[in-house]
Amino acid sequence: MNRSASVVTVLLLTLGGASATYLLQLNSAPQIAAELRLLDSRELLDVLAAGYYDNQPLEQPLTLVDSTLRHSTLAGGYRAMRSGQTVAVLLRSRSVGYAGMLELLIAIDVNGKLLGVKTLEQRETPGLGGDIGDWPNAWLRSFTGQSRSEPTDAGWALKKDQGQFDQIAGATITSRAAVNAIHDALRYFDEHRALLLGAGT
């Protein structure tokens, strides 16, 4: 085989290999994208216990009305379902902490009880308010089981503000912002329950 024939053979093999790789990637791309979305969803939604829901809440965002609340703004909402029935509502809440934006994911069951809270974004000082970004988070977990009326409105405050809740050490402003945002979300749920839960719940 002469040199030019060898070069042509190598080029054809290279082109064939590249084409096969491209076609394989093209066919695999949707599945890979779906698996990445599922992984992102699991990491975001680990505020809910495994097996608590069987749908993909992030793919079914809720249309929220009156989303500017007393101390926070709702940036989105999702409905978690199991066997076609709503089991929880997740609200993305934004407020302002000590150093800037504080975004929380707040999970509420159909009875208005808090299932969990997870920090999605924060800019607080590491070792102080920045601890609110840890997951799992013992301080945020202390709110589990609370509702709009348990404690009373007056109780939905830090102890230093004559309320019921401890604060993150050295982070009064961040703690206050989180308490107020969680209470806002629970109040919003109660006032918009039918819209958030959907028909048949």
Image: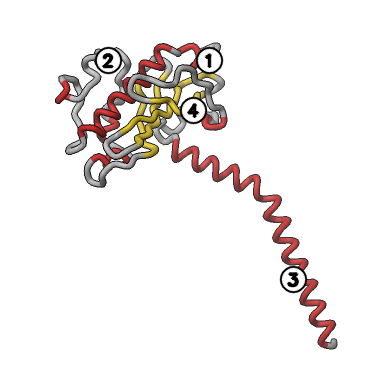
Amino acid carrying label 2: it is: Glu
Q: CA distance from mark 2 to mark 4?
A: 25 Å
Disc 1 residue crowd, few under 14, some 14–19, many 20+, Cα 10 Å: few
Q: In the rendered view, how is the structure colored?
A: secondary structure
Which residue is label 2 attached to? 150
Q: Is residue 41 above or below residue 109?
A: below
Residue found at x 53% / y 21%: 63
Location of residue 182 by image quarter: top left
Amino acid carrying label 1: it is: Gly
Q: Secondary structure at mark 3?
A: helix
Q: CA distance from mark 1 to mark 2?
A: 24 Å
Mark 2 touches mark 4? (CB < 8 Å):
no
Query: Of marks 4 and 1, which one's residue comes earlier in the chain?
Result: 4
Mark 3 touches mark 1? (CB < 8 Å):
no
Q: CA distance from mark 4 to mark 1?
A: 16 Å
Amino acid carrying label 4: it is: Tyr
Q: CA distance from mark 4 to mark 3?
A: 48 Å
Q: Secondary structure at mark 4?
A: loop
Query: Of marks 3 and 1, which one's residue comes earlier in the chain?
Result: 3
Q: Residue 53's mark?
A: 4
Q: Is residue 86 above or below residue 124?
A: above
Image label count = 4
Disc 3 residue crowd, few under 14, some 14–19, many 20+, Cα 10 Å: few
- Quadrant assignment for the N terminus: bottom right
Query: Of marks 1 and 2, which one's residue comes earlier in the chain?
Result: 2
Query: Of marks 4 and 3, which one's residue comes earlier in the chain?
Result: 3
Q: CA distance from mark 2 to mark 3?
A: 68 Å
Q: Residue 14's mark?
A: 3
Which residue is label 1 attached to? 198
Closer-to-camera residue (94/85): 94
Query: Of marks 2 and 3, which one's residue comes earlier in the chain?
Result: 3
